[in-house]
Structures are given as C-alpha cells and as structure tokens.
Amino acid sequence: MVDLSGRWVKIGDAELVKSVHEAVVIEFGHKALQYTDTAGAPEPRKELQRLLARAGLPRHVPLFTTSLADSLRLVAAAHLERGECLDVEDPSQREALVYAACGRPKAVYIQPHWRNPDGHIYSAEELRAAASRAPLVVYDLTYGLLAAEVPAVAEAAVVVVGSLDPLFPGLHLGFVAAPEELFPTYLALLEGAYLHPPTYMQYLFYVAMKTRAIDEVFAVLRRREALLRAYCPATPYFAWCKPRDKTRFLRLGAMEGSVFSGRGLFGEYVRLGLTSATEEELATLLSGVPPEELQGGGHS
C-alpha cells in the first residue's frame, strides 16, 4: 500500500543503497565505527560546509547533531532565556512550534527554501523583512540544502539548522551551522549535552555525497514532484493539497495541515509525503483522481 507519511526515503534501487553502505564499511570502517570529534568527523563536516557555501553561507561552521529537534534545542540553549521564544512562521516545521509559545520572541525561525509543509520559497525581500523582526535569524535548510541559494541578509546574525534525513535512505543526522564567532559557544553546549551522533551516519552522508548517490535519489524525488505538480504545489519531498475528501489521503499516512500550525489553522489541507512513495505508486494512486479533486493548495 502506498505510504504518504514521508517519514522515510523509499527508492527502488536497492543496489544503490547497498553500494553506499559497503563503501562506508570498506573505505572508512576504521573511522566510521568508532567515536570522533565532538563537532563531527572532519571529512563529512567539510562536505557539509561545502554545501552550505553553495547555498550562500560560506562563513558558517557546521556541527553534527542527532536530529533537527536536537539542533533546535542547542539554538534554544545558546540564545533563549526563560520566557523567551522563537518567532515561528505559520505553517511551519512541527519541531519548531514548541519554541513559539510566548510573547517575547528572541529570534526569527524560517525555512528559506521549500518551507514545510507548503513549499514556499522566500524572496530576498521577505528574508530582509523577517530579519528586521529580531537580532537573530534561524534558517532551517532541511529541505532546501541541495537547491537553495539563500541571499545574504545584512545586519542579521544567522544560525542554520537542519536534518539530513531526507537526502538518502536510512540516513539519520542533524546539524547546526554557526558563524565563526558563535562556534565555540555551540561546541561547548554540544560537549555538555553529549548529543554525539553516530560516526557511521556522518560517513554515510559523506560517501553518499561523494559517490553522487544523493544526486541520484534527488533526481528520483524530482520526478515525483513533477507528477504531483499537475494536482497541487509540490517539492521533491512533499506536496501541499486541499482535497475535497481528506480521508482517503489521511488513511495512507498523509498529515493534516493543522498539525503544522501553532494556531490550529490549515485543517482543510493535507501534506502528502513524497519520499516514502515511489513514482509508480503515486501514479497509480492519482490515476483515478481528477486534478480538480485536489484543488491546488497554493502557498499559505
């Protein structure tokens, strides 16, 4: 049965996944199967820094965490005092909503490229407007890391967070990237919290990048995006739809839009996870659905 949860990455090429895991063990087993530096293993961190520079953030120094939730916990520990919170977009990542319930925002949290769940891409003007609301901006590049080109925002201190899970099957890894002057603060917090992610996962990310296996997975996901765009706004990772009948999609694991809102809005929408359903499964599911049935969600 088709799975629209988007909680994992499903591709048909099992040999691709196997070859990457074999390369991790054979080429980096002496490193990947033991502990490494607190901030992360050198080669994977350098690769992540290259991706961040390509996205327009060349001065940011990355550290690995176990998840996006842990990355946000580090941000909160570094910058939020009791009673302070994040100014969070609506709709937004569910992990960020827990930091939005207060009246004194200390930092602005946004997803500049392919916002979850509606796929919005921020313009330079929107980023500048967001940066004007607080002295610190938190960019979440969970879904935009491979495609984003984030315009520089003058006068704004920017910390970057994200999850690498959507990039490759079985990958479970998060990150924080901070300007050089904030790096010692984050490193000390990481050491104190002992949020050390498995070294194997770091090298799984590294090998999947260096062998271009992540590019192959991304190309598969882009074909799923193209298929869904005939029905509603979509990214390679999810689609944001406004169906006449939500139940048929919710039964298949799709998420109701209201769970992405701190105000309980967007209940008429559903988020269809595309990472966990193959192109063939999606085509079969949609073959009997006229485009007007999904009504095109639009950006919120």
Image: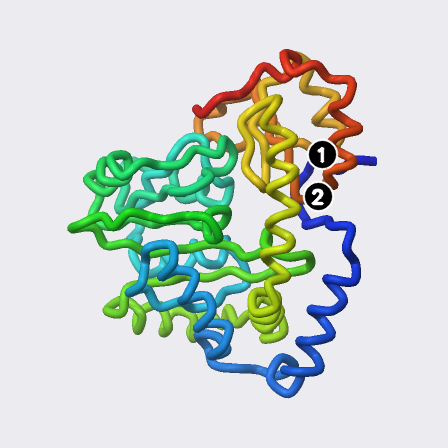
Residue 50 in the image, given as x and y percentages of width and height? 41, 66
Q: Residues within 10 Å of mark 2 (few under 14, many from 20)?
A: many
Residue 10 appears at what percent x and percent y? Answer: 73, 49
Amino acid of disc 2: Ser
Residue at horizontal 48 percent and vertical 21 percent from the top: 298
| Residue labelled with disc 2 | 276
Residue at 62% x, 83% y: name it.
Answer: 34
Comparing 260 with 120, the one in front is 120
Indicate the quadrant containing the C terminus: top left, top right, bottom left or bottom right: top left
Left or right: residue 1 compared with residue 68: right
Q: Please give the name of the residue rendered at 42% of the width and 70% of the height, measured from the top-left corner.
A: 190
- Identify the amino acid type marked 1: Gly
Labels 2 and 1: the sequence-earlier one: 1
User: Residue 95, how many percent across, how many down?
Assistant: 49, 45
In this figure, which residue is indicated by the disc labeled 1?
Answer: 253
The N terminus sits in image quarter:
top right
Number of numbered callouts drawn: 2
- Closest to the camera, between mark 2 and mark 1, is 2
Q: Secondary structure at mark 1?
A: loop
In-image side of 205 versus 126 (left or right): right
Quadrant of residue 15 in the image? bottom right
- The residue lying at 40 percent from left, 44 percent from top is 99
Q: Residue furthest bottom?
A: 30
Position of 75 with respect to 95 (left or right) is left
Tell me if label 2 and label 1 are in contact, CB under 8 Å. Answer: yes
When the figure is inspected, residue 279 is found, relative to residue 206, above or below; the finding is: above
Is 214 located above or below residue 8 in the figure? Answer: below
State the residue in front, 23 or 87.
23
Quadrant in the rendering for residue 88 = top left
Between 5 and 166, the residue placed more toward the observer is 166
Q: CA distance from mark 2 to mark 1?
A: 10 Å
Say which element carries label 2: loop
